[in-house]
Amino acid sequence: MSKGKPIVVYLHRYPPEIEAFQWPALRELADALAPAYELVYACMGPADGTRDAELRRKMRVVELPFSVDQTNGRDKWLKTLRWYRHLGGLLRRIREMDPALIICKETLPLIPGRVAKLGIPTIIETSDWWWSILLGHFGWGRKLADWMEAREVRSWNRPNVKATVSTKAEGRLLAARGLDESRVAVINAPQNPGVFRPLDPAPAKAELGLDPALKHFAIFGIIRGGKGYDQLLDWWKLAVAKHADWRLVIIGGAGGEAWCRQEIAKRGLEQAVHMTGWLPTKQDVNRWLNAMDALLAHRRNSPDNQGIIPSALYNGLSTGRPVVATGLPGIAEIVRDGVDGFLFAPDDGGSFIAALERVAADPAAAARIGRAGMARAAECFNPKSSALAHRALVDSMV
């Protein structure tokens, strides 16, 4: 790559091999930037030492002297603490590069604000609301999280700083937190094509140890209380009292499995809920998703969830299975009820059960809506569109 090109730094704690899966527009973004910019990716190293040579040829990678095992919850937290310890030195190295712009994909608490203070044009990619994730399980914690998030967002009100969001609702949330609306850019969140997809033939339920005579509805992803798993289990107790042939399947874990099993036992739902535990590959997850009668994209109605597009939504839509989702403002910008998915009213167990009853009552219509949801995902979460929109934003700021 030419040394004469302006440098764009992509800052994220995970290495590009992981990020290219989590944010699937990375390869397209590297290609879109290549004619005019040099892309420098700053991160930790990969856990197993395996590096994607083809991907890394598209960029220069600056690695901190330690690696992270993203599949190990304990290692993720320990390495995150090390990331914070090394951040000051890493930012000094970035400043010495004299970049034209920084794309800050790391939204851990206080990091975007520190990057913005460098005085270099910065794009802050909003995603998870970490203060709410860490503190938002209780009333006092949610209040403290709201205050900390507002304080963080206001620190982004600096010259040459933009924040990208996936939905207009998320933009309104940032504005409510104190960010100048002129600093918000709406860019689609790209999906990962080809991983979560329809399987033909779909795995039989019996292959997975499930009773084919029962209806199975799955929620999947990292388990944590802020997503509303406890609320979902409260609703499920009501659902199976009405529909004895329904089963909830919880796919995933990464730290929250023990807590979730306790919540299941507390409600006496051991026979009505099946937990798979953490599955080793995304392909394994996709097999389970393809065997389900419907997939759930559930979030409780809290400020941190108002505008988000959870990965469970676009991954679920991409399988072509019917998706039943919380009708929060951000999700409702994507899913049109009865057209390409099913929506239920936030924090409303009766509405949730009614949405599942619609799926169960007419499997043919649910299958048709599931196929429409797959087309909707391809339309709304296109990696190339996301990459080109980022290139245009970089150009406008540089």
Image: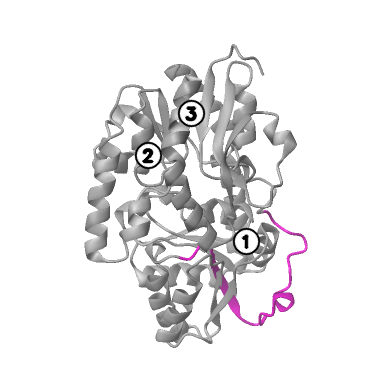
Give the answer, above or below, for where 327 lies relative to 223: above
The amino acid type of the residue labelled 2 equals: Lys
The amino acid type of the residue labelled 3 equals: Arg
Q: Nearer the viewer, residue 137 or 364?
A: 137
* Label 3 crowd (10 A; few <14 / some 14-19 / many >=20): few
Q: CA distance from mark 1 to mark 3?
A: 52 Å
Which quadrant would residue 171 be assigned to in this image? Answer: top left
Say which element carries label 2: helix
Is residue 397 highlighted in magenta?
Answer: no
The amino acid type of the residue labelled 1 equals: Ala
Question: Where is residue 354 drawn, in percent x and y?
Answer: 43, 70
Main secondary structure type of the part rendered in magenta: loop
Labels 2 and 1: the sequence-earlier one: 2
Residue at label 1?
A: 367
Q: Do the CB atoms of the residues marked 2 and 3 lie less than 8 Å apart?
A: no
The reply to whether residue 285 is in sight is yes
Along the horizontal axis of the image, is 209 left or right of 76? right
Comparing labels 2 and 1, the label whose residue is closer to the camera: 2
Q: Residue at x 63, y 64 (%)?
A: 289
Say which element carries label 1: helix
Residue at label 2?
A: 168
Q: Nearer the viewer, residue 241 or 42?
A: 42
Which quadrant would residue 278 be assigned to in this image? Answer: bottom right
Question: Where is residue 245 drawn, in percent x and y?
Answer: 55, 84
Question: Where is residue 77 drawn, in percent x and y?
Answer: 47, 57
- Bounds of the magenta segment: 197-223
Residue at label 3?
A: 93
